[in-house]
Amino acid sequence: MKRTVPMIIAATTGFVLIMSHFIPLSEEWGSKAMQWFNVLAAIAFVLGGSNLMRMNLQKISDRRPGWGYAAVTLIAFLVTLSVGLLKVGVQPTSSFPTNAWAAPYNQEGSSLWWLYEYLYKPLASTMFALLAFFIASAAFRAFRAKNPEAIALLSTAFIVLMGRTYVGGLMRDILPRGMEWLSFDSMTNYIMGVFNLAGMRAITIGIALGVASTSLKVLLGVDRSYLGSGDD
Amino acid sequence: MDRSFDILHFAFLSFQSSVVTRVNVAFGVALVSMLMCHPVLAQSSPQSVTDLVAKDHPNDVGTTLDVSWSLSPDDDPDADPPAVSTYHILRKREGDAEFTKVGEVPLQSTSFTDKNVERKQAYLYQVVAVGPGGESAAVTTTEAATPVMEWFRTDRGWLAVFVLLICTAVTTFIVIAKSGRELYIRNIPGLEAVDEAVGRATEMGRACLFVPGIQDINDIQTVAGITVLSRVASLTAEYGARLEVPTARSLVMTTARETVEASYLAEGRPDAYRKDDIYYLTDEQFGYAAAVTGTITREKPAACFYMGTFYAESLLLAETANGVGAIQVAGTAEPAQLPFFVAACDYTLIGEEFFAASAYLSGEPIQLGSLRGQDVGKLLVAALVLIGCGVATWGSVAANTELVGGEMAASLMSFLQDNVLGSKGFLP
């Protein structure tokens, strides 16, 4: 029962969504199903939030290694939650000049907006910026010329890398007439437009077929591993 | 003296009056001329639109009508100011007396979509060009338009055909597999490595980290990732290794808990199941990446699995785990992230391999049947690619030589491009 009911719900919703793509009459059913999912996800957020609180409180109370990070997480979570829920710093708008509560919670200048702009965004940007260093270290490992395949990969990567820079276009002016195809940018375009595109299309076709097959297995109830155990 | 002064005064006044009058008249004439020449005030109302037609919007539930017309001859966007600024669209039900305005579109527009009509009700439309000089005469549609519901979206017909073919192939092979026939499935090294990775973690006495992507459970990649988690959990339960699953969505946390618990139960180790090892972190992409990389750095897991939807955080996670010497297996259907995983992980499940994982790992004949169905789909696509290449080559060669059938090849090619591959096929 514990697996059958969710499976029926998943299958029905899945078939409705497929139908809504081809049958105009069921288009609205499809959007209704998505609205239901959003409602469920919003309710589940309470589950996630309470789990986050409980886990971190437990870590602090047990003085487990890294409990200081848990304290920072909890403080940040509670401050952001209360500032957003209470709409701290939100000013009344022209539509409702006497009631600040009618204004959006993320209004420019509000405390939540400030937290997002000056705390969250710089932190997220910092994480994203780290990617540059990780790309360099991953490329260093991946492009080690240890066998013929790796040499081919390294050469191709070098051409594409140069072709994407200012040097790529610069070579075009130096090369004699009729030999422009040897410039890095021409070779890059050829590699990206022929070899890379063909490979990407093959992967994309495989993915599309995999998605169709997996979806069908879920809808038909062939694959039930995501439903947990059948015991009540 | 006085008299002569009076005469002089009278003469002066007459002259002055005459001059003033003439000046006034001249000024008046100049003003009128100027006004007549001014582009704004001199404009008259614009000319009407032509070829006004209203018709049913295709492939909808019968609540939309499309109105189209040819521009008013005065509609010139380069004019300063333009003679036409907007077109007003008016509508009435057939049989009603009055038209009411239902919308307006800016100059240079030749169509309007009315999404607020009743099914099977006939409507007449009027379009009026409006500009600084006034309104044009209203033009009315000669025939009433009636919105009709279509039962099937013909613009997605080819897509439906392919979906049906692939679904039939998958279902057929599932049925064949159910009948007990043995199916050959090629070896997938990335999936074979799952056992090795969990075994290594057990030997080292460290945890296994499973990251199910950053999307919610309505994403098919997350579902595929959860099915792999089921197998990983079975192995950790069997070997007695610790399994940690940080999630970026609450629903994924709930699903992962159910799945892992079921696996531990199936392995006869419900006591070893630790609910708190499957936890929610944050929905925010980089917040999640920061938390998981922190966990990797502090706890140094021996095996890391990344199965699901990943974006920029893929390399952050994989490189951090590489730094702590973890054996890594990744699987995703995000083509842009595959190179990162290939560079940083020991094994990567590329696209379809990732979706095949659940069937491969379970070893159930019914699930393996679905893989064969996928192969039929691949055969179909390969055949279509070959036919397309052949036809395109034939058409191209025939265009430059005397080869027969060039026209037929060209028309077949344009049919494939416009229908199968175009707006009525895979690119609706």
Image (tube, coloured by chain):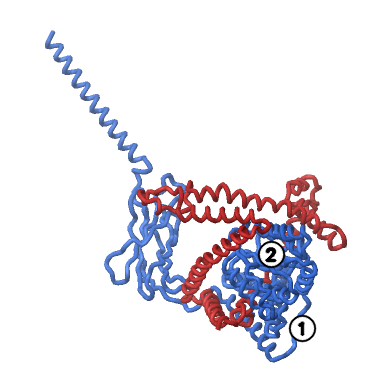
Q: Colour of chain A?
A: red
- Tag 2 secondary structure: loop
Pointer 1 indicates a residue of which chain? Answer: B
> Measured along the vertical axis of the image, is residue B2 above or below residue A9?
above
Disc 2 target residue: B335
Query: Furthest residue to the front?
Result: A62
Residue A185 x/y as whole percent: 75, 52
Q: Nearer the viewer, residue B47 or A19?
A: A19
Pointer 2 indicates a residue of which chain? Answer: B
Q: Which residue is drawn at 19% across and 21% down?
A: B14
Q: Which of marks 2 and 1 is nearer the N terminus?
A: 1
* CA distance separating discs 2 and 1: 27 Å
Disc 1 target residue: B184
Residue type beneath disc 2 = Pro
Residue A67 location, quadrant: bottom right
Q: In the visual, does B139 lie left or right of B322?
A: left
Quadrant containing the C terminus of chain B is bottom right
Residue A134 location, quadrant: bottom right
Q: Which residue is drawn at 74% across and 54% down?
A: A135
Label 1: few (<14), some (14–19) or many (≥20) C-alpha neighbours in 10 Å: few
Residue type beneath disc 1 = Tyr
Residue B315 x/y as whole percent: 71, 59
Q: Nearer the viewer, residue A215 or A7?
A: A7
Q: In the visual, does B134 lie left or right of B328?
A: left
- Tag 1 secondary structure: loop
Q: Colour of chain B?
A: blue
